[in-house]
Image (cartoon, coloured by chain):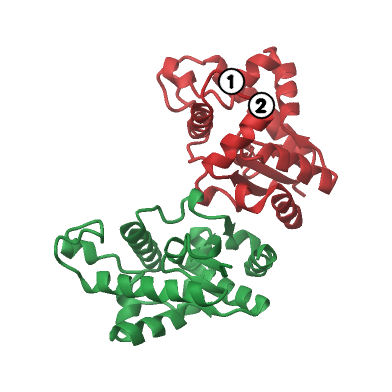
Chain colours: A green, B red
Amino acid sequence: MKNRIITIGREFGSGGRTIGRLVAEKLGIPCYDQELIQKLAEESGFTADYIQNESEDAAHGFWSVGVLNADQPWGYSSNQDRLWSIQNDVITELGEKESCVIVGRCADVILEDKADLLKVFIHADFNKRAQRIVEKYGETEIPTEKRLREKDKRRAMYYQLYTDQKWGAVENYHVILDSGVLGIDKCVEIIASLY
Amino acid sequence: MKNRIITIGREFGSGGRTIGRLVAEKLGIPCYDQELIQKLAEESGFTADYIQNESEDAAHGFWSVGVLNADQPWGYSSNQDRLWSIQNDVITELGEKESCVIVGRCADVILEDKADLLKVFIHADFNKRAQRIVEKYGETEIPTEKRLREKDKRRAMYYQLYTDQKWGAVENYHVILDSGVLGIDKCVEIIASLY
């Protein structure tokens, strides 16, 4: 029997990561988020910092490589493509090993036919997300609005680059929640109740 | 204090109408769907049949009128524009009168600042919707696939025409559920629990 896995896509600053952690705690199953970066580091030889900066939130590989489809890299494989391939293996292995929550990293598409999925997407109003990232990560020299837009853009591009699907599009998820209006706790309750 | 209103946008065949009715029953509040057509008929002088065919699912007014924005109708107002205006008044009045569920008809946008809204969108996989509309409405001489695509396209165009927003886009809703995967009853339970 396939493992039951909750995948959580999320806009930056929407609290999706926190929701994932709390859902996993409530259900008594593991949550893979930063842990995934450690696993990727072990498997790939890249440092965790490099992976943090160069994978999900940084869809710039195809600018330098000049391709939009990782399956046809014109004879060239960027670090990002290599990371994608390892990530694919690591997430597939996880999906076959145990029921869990996985935050981001296209796990919804990677595990599509390999696990019994509940595909969740978390979003929130721009201003609420801006407020949240300043509270959580502090101000930086890059204006908050730009940080938000850039991060979301890169997540969307990364998702499209490697899955050929549209990030945050209604048809790709079973449950989409506005954490800004519903609140983190209610989102956790709904997702856990659907498991 | 503003009334609490659940608005339900839905893909054709997703069971959104049924979900709306069941949520309203569960909460003991009225549900406006076909009832709205009766109200519109009373207010407008058009027949219910005409309204059924010419409003939400038939965004063809602007082809003949040649405009995309009802605010600037180049001196011309189609029947559809007139119906929109009456619908706007009827839904605004409802929103000010009582807490309720309203299915479709851009109620989410019409009541945006006029009520305490829970904005829901229901969707489902194409094949599940096709199966549902054949079970519910039977076969017609128009192929099922075409019926689905046309109806969704027209709802989307109608929504965009009169609200300047994108129908079924994540940012416009608080809760988006895949009724094909979650099932009608679970959708009802979630929505009622959020009220």
Q: Position of residue A79 (x, y in %)?
A: 23, 74
> SS for tag 1?
loop
Inspect the image, locate mark 2, and give the three-letter code of the amino acid beneath it: Tyr
Q: From the image, which quarter does the C terminus of chain A lie in?
A: bottom right
Q: Residue at x 19, y 61 (%)?
A: A73
Determine whether label 2 and label 1 are within 8 Å by CB. yes
Q: Position of residue A126 (x, y in %)?
A: 48, 59
Q: Is residue A26 left or right of residue A158?
A: right
Q: Which residue is mark 2?
A: B137
On residue A20, the disc is none
Can you tell which quarter of the image residue A80 is in?
A: bottom left
Can you tell which quarter of the image residue A25 is in?
A: bottom right
Chain holding disc 1: B
Q: Residue at x 58, y 19 (%)?
A: B54
Q: Which residue is mark 1?
A: B140
Inspect the image, locate mark 1, and give the three-letter code of the amino acid beneath it: Thr
Q: Is residue B84 left or right of residue A79?
A: right
**Crowd class of label 2 (few under 14; some 14 to 19; many from 20; radius 10 Å):** few
Q: Residue at x 36, y 58 (%)?
A: A163
